[in-house]
Image (tube, rainbow, N blue to C red):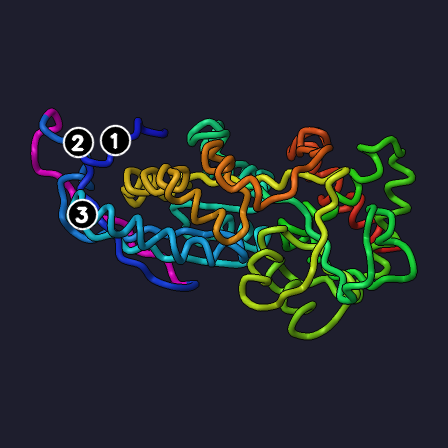
Amino acid sequence: MRKPNLSLKTLAIATLLSSSLFACGSPNQNQSTTPESETTTAQTQSQEPVTITLVTYAVTRSAYEKIIPLFVEQWKTETGQTVTIEQSYGGSGSQTRAVIDGLEADIVALALGSDINAIEEAGLIDPGWETEAPRDSVVTSSVIAIVPRNPNLKITQWTDLAENDLEIITANPKTSGGARWNFLGLWGAITQTGGTEAEAREFVTKIYKNAPILPKNARESTDVFYQQGQGDILLNYENEVYLANLQGENQPYTILTDFNIAIDNPVTVVDKTVDERNTRDVSEAFVEFLFTPEAQAIFAEVGFRPTDPDVAAQVADQYPAIKNLATIEDFGGWREAQPKFFGDGGIFDQIFQQ
């Protein structure tokens, strides 16, 4: 069961940082010997170090590498206890399966709600996780960006992608959350603008028939396109393309504003893990920290659209405004869209097997 959050100053925790994909920490074995009426939790009484693990999707690394040290410093200053935050990065779908199969995560920050729903259905996260953090637990958002290799190639509407046998680089929806958003964006470009599902299937089929490779995740898609030189068009997160340009790629890209899709990225604690390891307090505090203006501004620095309205207003000029912005609810929500489009035998499987 979830416990009420304690204020930051009542907890005795600070944080150290580990930098990449590592094994999870051991459960905190400290127990209080004080009568229950005089205690809060064993964690808050103990000054012993504690480890928590953040499992997240591939393209978030640039943000968390900046955010975690700030959380580390704040907790060290305010509380004095040491916490190590271990991190695991990979495709959102692959990360989801890893957690279900035994990777101990205290916190999951994934590319889409259906991945967290899958962890909930496995009995690791309590129902109602969407209400446990601000803004329905959506910590960042993005849209689909289109990157042509030839800067003279102008993509002015979604259907241009199916013309002239253009090779499209997009990740595999079976392993990548970003790829599922790409698929829904392509589908919705037809069905959400007056077309039929039959027309959407025909359009999306053309796109995937022109995909020479389906990388495992959004970051690998970026590498395939920029480093390996494959494909005529890259479909990826706006934030991933924005970051690539910050890092020197200088490749023009297009955000189609007549229609696009809100790529909402949720975060939550993994109830079974935090209760077994007695790490709920620090894990929930870290989740809350991600919604602070300070953390939201860092997400914006690396290309994510912040969900904090004040921060979003401050960086509004950084992002093209979308006239027709679809949401997952336009596809019935993830509990309907996931099996329909990406489940075994779903529409993606049907298209891919043609």
Quadrant position of residue 206: bottom right
Which of the two labelled residues, at mark 1 and mark 3, occupies the earlier sequence position? Answer: 1
Question: Magenta residues?
Answer: 22-37
Question: At x 41% / y 37%, what residue is drawn?
Answer: 291
Gap in angstroms between the C-alphas marked 1 and 3: 17 Å
Quadrant position of residue 283: top left
Which of the two labelled residues, at mark 2 and mark 1, occupies the earlier sequence position? Answer: 1
Label 3 amino acid? Thr
Residue position for label 2:
40
User: Which mark is in front, 2 or 1?
Assistant: 1
Label 1 amino acid? Leu
Gap in angstroms between the C-alphas marked 2 and 1: 9 Å
Marks 2 and 1 close (CB-CB < 8 Å): yes
Q: Residue 25 in the image: x percent, y percent?
A: 31, 56
Q: Is residue 159 left or right of residue 236?
A: right
Tag 3's secondary structure? helix
**Looking at the rendering, in which quadrant would you find the N terminus?**
top left
